[in-house]
Image (cartoon, rainbow, N blue to C red):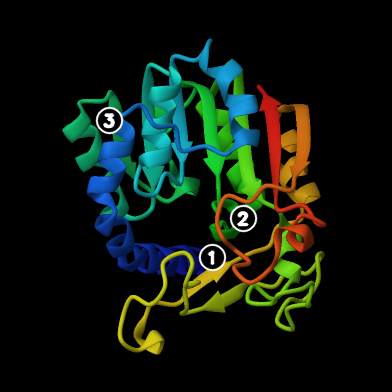
Amino acid sequence: MDFMIQEHDQNREAWNEASEHYRKNLNEDLRFLKGGGKNFCAPELKFLEPLAEKCNRAIHLQCAGGTDTLSLINLGIKEVIGVDISEEMIHIARTKSIELQMPATWIVSDILNTPSELNGKADLVYTGRGAINWIMDIEAWGKVIARLLKPGGFLYLFEGHPVTFFFDMLGSDLKFDTEFQGYFSDKTYQSQKWPKTYVGKIKDREEEQSMKYERAWPISNVITSLLKAGLTLHQFEEHPEAYWKEFPNMPDDVRTKFPNTFSLLMKK
């Protein structure tokens, strides 16, 4: 457990560093949100639009810089609460909501320690887009979601599919990543690098960047953790759509041969 806490804390440091990338896009994000922008992929809108009609409060776990969180308000949700482990990311998110005068609350916290004051407060818990790979205890994560939801509330998870870990991100075809240990491996992957199509290089020397830790959770582990926590499964879908340019050199007709993302809708 202590080692897991250390890994989460290292991830916090890495995301504080990565916040510089988000800060550069602050004005662009403000214009997007002020214009009513909704930063969601097509599969997400299919799930979120009906949920927004009956949702007063949403809690966004691992909210990063808050653009997705505030997009929920543009979708029609009345109030949002964003939770993230990174102080710098929360600062960026808070800056956006103050500038736009949107009803949002921001909390700095390890997701597994999300404050108990939020228990039973969410009509919707929203998370994903590269979130659960940073979590080292998926069963504890499931319990957090269950306690945050009101009875009858929903979890919507839109996440990168774990099979994307199989392939070399810079490959032009389906070439296996030699570092990947297999779908059912419990290995924790560590790196000081960020993909160029996402954050890129933060410092002149990548080896000076903070170490970060990730897990490729099998989807069965994710669903089981939520079922054990008392949620019921309503819908599960796999999608060819990607939410970021993970494979910049891979043609779409190759990339869409495997699922890039998945949706999970569960109810308390």
Amino acid tagged 1? Met
Q: Where is residue 256, by image quadrant?
A: bottom right
Nearest the eye: 139 or 174: 174
Q: Which-is-in-front pick, marks 3 and 1?
A: 3
Q: Residue at x 46, y 38 (%)?
A: 39
Report helix, strand or loop for mark 1. Answer: helix
Q: Residue at label 1?
A: 4
The residues tagged by marks 2 and 3 sit, at their Cα atoms, a distance apart of 37 Å
How many residues crowd around disc 2 within 10 Å: few (fewer than 14), some, or many (20 or more)? some
How many residues crowd around disc 3 within 10 Å: few (fewer than 14), some, or many (20 or more)? some
Q: Residue at label 3?
A: 34
The count of marks equals 3
Nearest the eye: 213 or 252: 252
Residue farthest along the left direction in this orientation: 99
**Which quarter of the image is occupied by the C terminus?**
top right
Horizontally, residue 217 falls left or right of residue 189, namely: right
Residue 137: which disc?
2
Horizontally, residue 21 falls left or right of residue 126, namely: left
The residues tagged by marks 2 and 1 sit, at their Cα atoms, a distance apart of 8 Å
Q: Measured from the top left, where is residue 254 in percent x and y? A: 78, 63
Q: Residue at x 53, y 24 (%)?
A: 124
Q: Measured from the top left, where is residue 238 in percent x and y? A: 77, 43
